[in-house]
Image: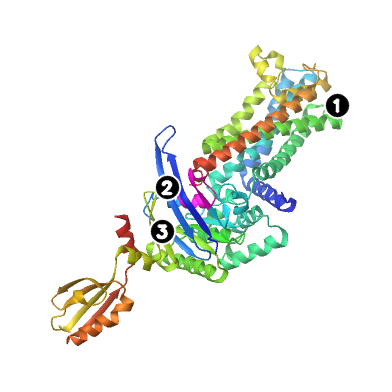
Amino acid sequence: METAISAQGISKSFRERRFGPWKTVLSQVDLEVAPGAIFGVLGPNAAGKTTLISILATLLHPDQGRARVLGLDVVREAGRLRQRINLAAAGAHFLWCLTAEENLRFYGRLYGLGGRALTAKVEGLLDLFQLADQRRVDFAHLSTGLKQRLMLAKALVNDPELLFLDEPTSGLDQEMAQHIREEILRLNRETGLTILLTTHNLREAEILCSEVAFLKEGRLAARGSIAELQQRLGLGDHLSLVFRVVPAALEYARLPGVLTHRVQDARVDLVLDRAEVRLAAVLEAVSHGGGELAQVKLKPVDLEEIYREITH
Amino acid sequence: MKLPTSFQKIWAFSVRSALVNRRNVFAVFEMLFWPAIGIFSVGLLTRFLNLSGETVTFILIGAISMNTVQIAQLDLSYALLYSVWSKSLKHEFIAPIRLIHILLGCGLVGLIRGFLVFVGMAVLSVWLFHMELDRPGPGGLAVFLAGMFINAAIIGALVLALVLRFGQRAEVAAWAFSYLMLLLCGLYYPVSVLPAWAQALARFIPLTYFLEYFRHFYGFPLHSSRPLLYGFSLSMVYLLISYGLLHYTLGSAFRGGILLRLSE
């Protein structure tokens, strides 16, 4: 199966100021994204996330390396590729004096839509993103949440096969951010739309992404699903047991899947390689040892932990 | 290039330009207030100086040309500045558009606005200052208008190139370019009164030839034997150069990240 995105050895440098020294923003980045995936690009500020997404979205030429999106070269076949992709970025910006509807119509025309097809598309997007009541409101007078919704609506005006989302929920309140996330998931599920997103919000990446890549100082530090990264980095799920009756001497280190453990009075903290597989065996061993549990807490490894491990 | 699709893309920029102008009080001011002030001040000055009918016409042609070219080039010059000001440049260039769509779309609105300014100023000149606008005939008038609009397109394309290179700082160029050109091409005076070096520069400005051509219908001498040939030839050369420059700066913007910086 052909990949939706395939990039090899992407590098990019910028001058910090005219005649100033060159600064490497991306260095030898390789990336592959499967069709239909929601792929997250994560990393701290200035890691090169927006530069990478801009190169893949044909807005910036790489200094080195090659990238193909939907089978088309991002530099040499940019014109044909642009018909099939779109972008929504943080901090929605459109022409301030055009209404929500006029802005959508403008972008629709840029993709060659006209007449009834344009009207039907714009009406559909206004309904989908609950913007119909604000259709005649100037962009400048829309709230931040509505602007961001309009940005997403614009990004779907050409029925893209691949969507780039650059921090799509940045600056939104929780409720609106959740609404946008649900919309992203729905689009991916119902239309098979491939999505590449950058985000600072690791919880958001956990909810949305089937696979992630971490950028650090312009280099690809790691990539894979959360489970794969957990395994590769040797990170485990945290299991905390609080006993009413402490079991007889139990060698926790010898229990299956235990990576580390710590005993403190009636509390035992274990780190398991894969909690969903090991939990039953651990609880059975505890029970055999005569222990009586008062409380069991399980905290699966999360992206934040993986992020800390990779970026520090 | 599929025609219906390209037409929609051109139309997108025309509609956007028209809407921005309609909602911008300064755009209305540009079209009504300044041209009217220009005609009144210049016309009344000629009356005060008690100039002959031909000389009054000579000067009024200059005033009309200045405002027509100035207004006609603005929509093109501002085509990308609107996007820079609204930080939406990258959303336009991620769409499958070409420079020609922007140039034709915004140029069309500039042409209409420029034509309206020309008609308004011509009506005032004929009505208040007895300018004989009909002497060159429809053909002469059409050639003169075409010359002015081509010059406006050259200025607009050059300003667009500057916007892609220098961003918002190029805004001042939108006005400065045309004023500099208009100063040299003999707007209110024959080119012969300029210093020799300025006269030499004026010969490289197409509008110089179109003004000479139009004024010769009123008895003023031609300084070149074939003004239309020189005027249109120079215009074509400059149009090609400015389009090439614009194409090059857009390529540089993709390589250097200027498109992204202008969208932040």
Q: Residues within 10 Å of mark 1 (few under 14, many from 20)?
A: few
Residue A105: x and y in percent read 64, 56
Left or right of A88, for residue B216: right
Amino acid type at circle 1 is Arg
Which residue has dot 2 on it?
A: A26
Discs 1 and 2 lie in a common subunit: no
User: Along the polypeptide, which appears first: circle 3 or circle 2?
Assistant: 2
Q: Residues within 10 Å of mark 2 (few under 14, many from 20)?
A: many
Residue at mark 1 to residue at mark 2: CA–CA distance: 66 Å
Residue at mark 3 to residue at mark 2: CA–CA distance: 14 Å
Q: Residue at x 71, y 17 (%)?
A: B191
Q: Nearer the viewer, residue A72 or B155?
A: A72
Host chain of mark 2: A
The relative height of residue B68 versus residue A194 in the rendered view (above or below) is above
Question: What range of the chain is rendered magenta?
Answer: A51-67
Discs 3 and 2 lie in a common subunit: yes
Q: Is residue B195 visible?
A: no
Host chain of mark 1: B
Which disc is residue A213 wearing?
3
Residue A25: x and y in percent read 41, 45
Which disc is residue B135 wearing?
1
Residue B224 belongs to magenta span:
no
User: Which coloring applies here?
Assistant: rainbow
Host chain of mark 3: A
SS at circle 3: strand
Discs 1 and 3 lie in a common subunit: no
Residue A202: x and y in percent read 38, 62
